[in-house]
Amino acid sequence: MNNKSNPIYSTKVKQSQRMAFLPKHTGRNFLRFESLIYSTMSSVCAEYNGGYWDFFDLSNGGFYMAMDLHPKISIFVDGNGYDGRMSSDAAGIVATLFALNRLIWVTESDELCSKYELLLDYAEQHKESGKIFAAID
């Protein structure tokens, strides 16, 4: 994991760059990843019913997706019993990590493993890191 002396920054992707975003980060698996992130959010967030997702590039080469929902949303992870409220940004990180993890199991892609670890490094520095890691544990 990354240390705090090397902060990682997120940058919201411009509208003109959205079409290339998922293929850039997930390669030919971009449609599968997109489906996985939507189904993941549906399974962990009762409030989720689709909508517009923002894309974020990370300064370390990673990425994530998040929605701009309510200030805090409820997340319940059946697999580990996590039940709490977090920002939609943190929930997007959780959903992206879960979707990447599921895709890695199918593809066995080293590049996707790297993207997962880069996002973990960012999550470690996130102001809601405790909630993110409790949800994915």
Image (cartoon, rainbow, N blue to C red):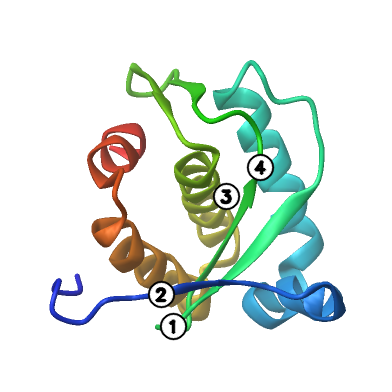
- Give coordinates of residue 3: x percent, y percent: 13, 74
C-alpha gap between disc 4 and disc 1: 21 Å
Instruction: Give the residue type at disc 2.
Output: Tyr
- Give coordinates of residue 63: x percent, y percent: 54, 69
Q: Residues within 10 Å of mark 2 (few under 14, many from 20)?
A: few
Pick whichever of labels 3 and 2 is earlier in the sequence: 2
Instruction: Give the residue type at disc 4.
Output: Asp
- Residue located farthest toward the front when viewing the structure as drawn: 71
Q: Which of label 1 and label 3 is nearer to you?
A: 1
Tell me the tag on residue 98.
none
In the rendered image, which quarter is residue 81 located in?
top left
C-alpha gap between disc 1 and disc 3: 21 Å
Residue at which label 2 appears: 9
- Please indicate whether residue 21 sits to the left or right of residue 78 in the image: right
For the N terminus, the image quarter is bottom left
- Give coordinates of residue 114: x percent, y percent: 41, 76
